[in-house]
Image: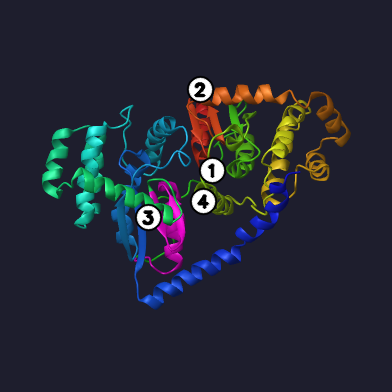
């Protein structure tokens, strides 16, 4: 057992205490009212980020639906410790944005590459000028569209219409935007910040909208109806005799894997699909950096997403290091015993929702026995076969990178490759398509 694993249940229990979040929101609203201030949402935009292209398209509707002020600003790209594998991330964003655009009736077309540096610089100079003049929302979508279409002539026309800042001034504004974003607790473009909380991307917007709705800031009558509703998983319209295979790339130290796993296994059962468990070492344990702000945001974001999915979350017994390795080493054994799903779910629930320290024999025994595995058999396997898992984990990592991904949970089914527990709707979409063939 590690020190991190020992102390994390105590720390996480406090951090994830719902009463703390309610109290923080209550204080923020009381402070706003005492100051006589309006609801103010900060939005950070990065034009060469496909996700930002999508979020910019809802700014007008968001301002119209809610009694809020939106303070939009351009920001420079995230640091390396917040956006590892930068080129792969940008390529993933383009592909992912296409799927999101179709899902939420927005617009994005992947040209197969990033905008050129020269055109991006001009776009940022136009947006900086528009931001200074209070015209950001009026021009951002037009700028993004012609930038990604690589239409230099139209960019020149927009520069004439909205003005253009100097290169030096633009760089200062981009840095200032990134610094302000960092102060507010985030690190990526396409991020909304409101009263102490952050909401990244179009498919987290509903959390912000729910908060504004609960505060009575919605201008429309009727029940809550977000601009980008959270996708709901369904079921096939008729029984499926032979389902597809789903490659499930996962680690045991991923809170998002904890949220995804029970939903994925349930989805697979509904579509009579087979789940192939493709475990990898956690990213931070294979040298992929993660800033403190990123780790903090992931924890809070997972809590929100888990609540929406009906998956318990916290207290956490972080299995970083040897506890995760020992846990991973047992996956091949559990699969060989026909208990792969049961073991993975038991382990994830233990460390991410029950504060069970998997690095101790007592904790691991509890995990494996409730998964239907014999403790004596587990001990024998650990003594004689416990080191063989590393080669399999490395093969899975290589396969994941060949798919253009590096993080978990990730999925491959049919022609679909997706990353994130919030992309299970893409998995279901492909399962339904394959079932019809």
Query: To which residue does mark 4 refer?
Result: 297
Q: Which residue is mark 2?
A: 402
Most foreground residue, 407 or 275: 407
Colour option used:
rainbow
Position of residue 399 in the picture relative to residue 362 (left or right): left
Identify which residue, 434 or 382, lies in the foreground: 382
Label whose residue precedes the other's in the sequence (3 or 1)? 3
Q: Disc 1 marks which residue?
A: 233
User: Gap in Å between the C-alphas at discs 4 and 2?
Assistant: 28 Å
Q: Secondary structure at mark 2?
A: helix
Label 1–label 4 contact, CB within 8 A: no
Above or below 212: residue 92:
above
Please report the bounds of the magenta region as a residue range.
191-219
Residue in front for this viewpoint, 1 or 423: 1
Q: Mark 4 or mark 1, which is nearer the start of the sequence?
A: 1
Residue with the mark numbered 3: 180
């Amino acid at each position: 057992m590690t020190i991190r694993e020992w102390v994390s249940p105590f720390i996480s229990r406090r951090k994830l205490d719902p009463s703390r979040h309610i109290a923080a929101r209550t204080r923020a609203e009381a402070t706003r009212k005492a100051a006589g201030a309006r609801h103010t949402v900060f939005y950070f935009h990065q034009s060469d980020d496909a996700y930002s292209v999508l979020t910019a398209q809802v700014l007008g509707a968001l301002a119209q639906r809610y009694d809020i002020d939106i303070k939009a600003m351009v920001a420079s790209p995230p640091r390396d410790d917040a956006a590892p594998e930068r080129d792969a991330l940008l390529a993933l964003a383009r592909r992912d944005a296409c799927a999101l655009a179709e899902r939420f009736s927005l617009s994005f077309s992947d040209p197969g590459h990033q905008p050129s540096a020269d055109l991006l610089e001009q776009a940022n100079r136009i947006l900086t000028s528009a931001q200074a003049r209070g015209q950001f929302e009026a021009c951002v979508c037009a700028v993004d569209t012609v930038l990604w279409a690589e239409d230099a002539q139209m960019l020149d026309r927009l520069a004439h219409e909205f003005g253009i800042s100097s290169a030096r001034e633009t760089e200062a504004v981009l840095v200032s935007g990134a610094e302000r974003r960092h102060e507010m607790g985030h690190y990526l473009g396409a991020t909304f910040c409101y009263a102490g909380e952050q909401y990244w991307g179009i498919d987290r917007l509903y959390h912000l909208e729910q908060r504004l709705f609960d505060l009575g800031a919605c201008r429309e009558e009727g029940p809550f109806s977000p601009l980008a509703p959270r996708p709901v998983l369904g079921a096939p319209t008729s029984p499926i005799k032979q389902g597809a295979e789903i490659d499930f790339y996962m680690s045991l130290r991923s809170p998002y894997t904890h949220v995804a796993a029970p939903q994925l296994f349930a989805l697979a059962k509904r579509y009579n699909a087979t789940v192939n468990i493709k475990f990898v070492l956690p990213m931070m344990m294979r040298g992929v950096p993660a800033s403190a702000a990123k780790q903090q945001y992931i924890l809070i974001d997972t809590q929100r997403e888990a609540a929406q999915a009906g998956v318990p979350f916290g207290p956490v017994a972080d299995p970083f290091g040897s506890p995760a390795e020992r846990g991973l080493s047992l996956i091949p054994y559990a699969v060989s015993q026909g208990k792969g799903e049961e073991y993975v779910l038991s382990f994830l629930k233990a460390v991410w929702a029950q504060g069970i320290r998997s690095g101790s024999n007592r904790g691991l025994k509890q995990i494996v026995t409730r998964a239907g595995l014999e403790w004596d058999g587990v001990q024998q396997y650990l003594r004689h076969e416990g080191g063989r898992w590393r080669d399999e984990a490395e093969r899975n990592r290589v396969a994941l990178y060949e798919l253009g991904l590096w993080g978990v949970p990730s999925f491959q089914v049919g022609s679909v490759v997706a990353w994130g527990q919030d992309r299970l709707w893409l998995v279901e979409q492909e399962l339904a398509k394959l079932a019809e063939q």
